[in-house]
């Protein structure tokens, strides 16, 4: 029948073209995430740059791979890879952000709302409640820590 049936391209041509577009878009999102890791000023914004576009970028790349391979046997494997990324990226970002907050590796001037300050103020370094709940100890940057500063 050739490459064209009644003036329309066949499915393999459409699938390859769509796969190429999705692969380029997914790669661009992953590249933006990598650039954000180097360009953003503090740990919390870097963490955001590393997780948000990366998950969508991986979805686009995996969809492109599924379209390029055109084999149904790979769909569950690719779907599992994306689901595991969706489960682990937010949890790991949350844990890294919380650890960075508690170890004072953040810049408070970049925070609009500090929702974790109340929780930290009611606990000591081991996570146990402090004796006076009215005493607030909002984390401040460590003046001796020169790492991760411009």
Image (cartoon, rainbow, N blue to C red):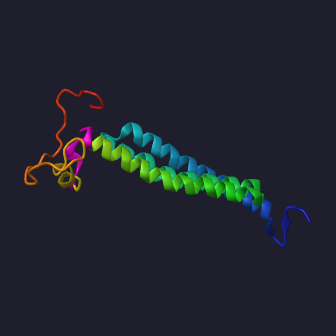
Residue at 18% over, 43% down: 139
Q: Position of residue 29 (x, y in %)?
A: 51, 49
Give the quadrant of residue 4. Answer: bottom right
Q: Work out whether residue 75 can be spotted.
A: yes
The magenta segment: 102-114
Q: Position of residue 62 (x, y in %)?
A: 63, 53
Residue at the right extreme of this rendering: 1
Residue at 43% over, 47% down: 92
* Magenta highlight on residue 103: yes
Residue at 46% over, 45% down: 33
Q: Position of residue 8 (x, y in %)?
A: 79, 69
Is residue 10 depicted above or below 112 in this figure? below
Q: Look at the image and tell me in which quarter the N terminus lies.
A: bottom right
Tell me: 56 left or right of 97: right
Q: Work out whether residue 48 can be spotted.
A: no
Tell me: 41 left or right of 117: right
Number of numbered discs on residues: 0
Nearest to the observer: residue 61 or residue 130: 130
* Magenta highlight on residue 64: no
Q: Position of residue 82 (x, y in %)?
A: 58, 55
Nearest to the observer: residue 40 or residue 85: 85
Is residue 10 depicted above or below 92 in this figure? below
Give the quadrant of residue 141. Answer: top left
Tell me: 92 left or right of 21: left
Nearest to the observer: residue 46 or residue 82: 82
Is residue 114 depicted above or below 107 in this figure? below
Q: Main secondary structure of the magenta part?
A: loop
Q: Look at the image and tell me in which quarter the C terminus lies.
A: top left
């Amino acid at each position: 029948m050739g490459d064209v049936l009644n003036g329309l391209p066949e499915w393999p041509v459409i699938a390859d073209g769509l796969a190429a577009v999705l692969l380029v878009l997914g790669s661009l999102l992953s590249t933006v995430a990598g650039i954000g890791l180097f360009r953003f000023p503090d740990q919390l914004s870097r963490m955001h740059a590393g997780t948000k576009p990366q998950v969508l970028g991986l979805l686009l790349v995996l969809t492109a791979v599924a379209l390029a391979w055109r084999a149904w046997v790979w769909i569950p494997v690719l779907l599992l890879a994306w689901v595991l990324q969706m489960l682990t990226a937010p949890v790991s970002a949350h844990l890294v952000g919380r650890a960075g907050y508690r170890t004072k590796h953040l810049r408070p001037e970049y925070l609009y709302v500090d929702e974790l300050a109340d929780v930290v103020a009611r606990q000591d370094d081991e996570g146990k409640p402090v004796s006076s709940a009215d005493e607030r100890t909002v984390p401040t940057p460590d003046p001796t820590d020169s790492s991760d500063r411009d």
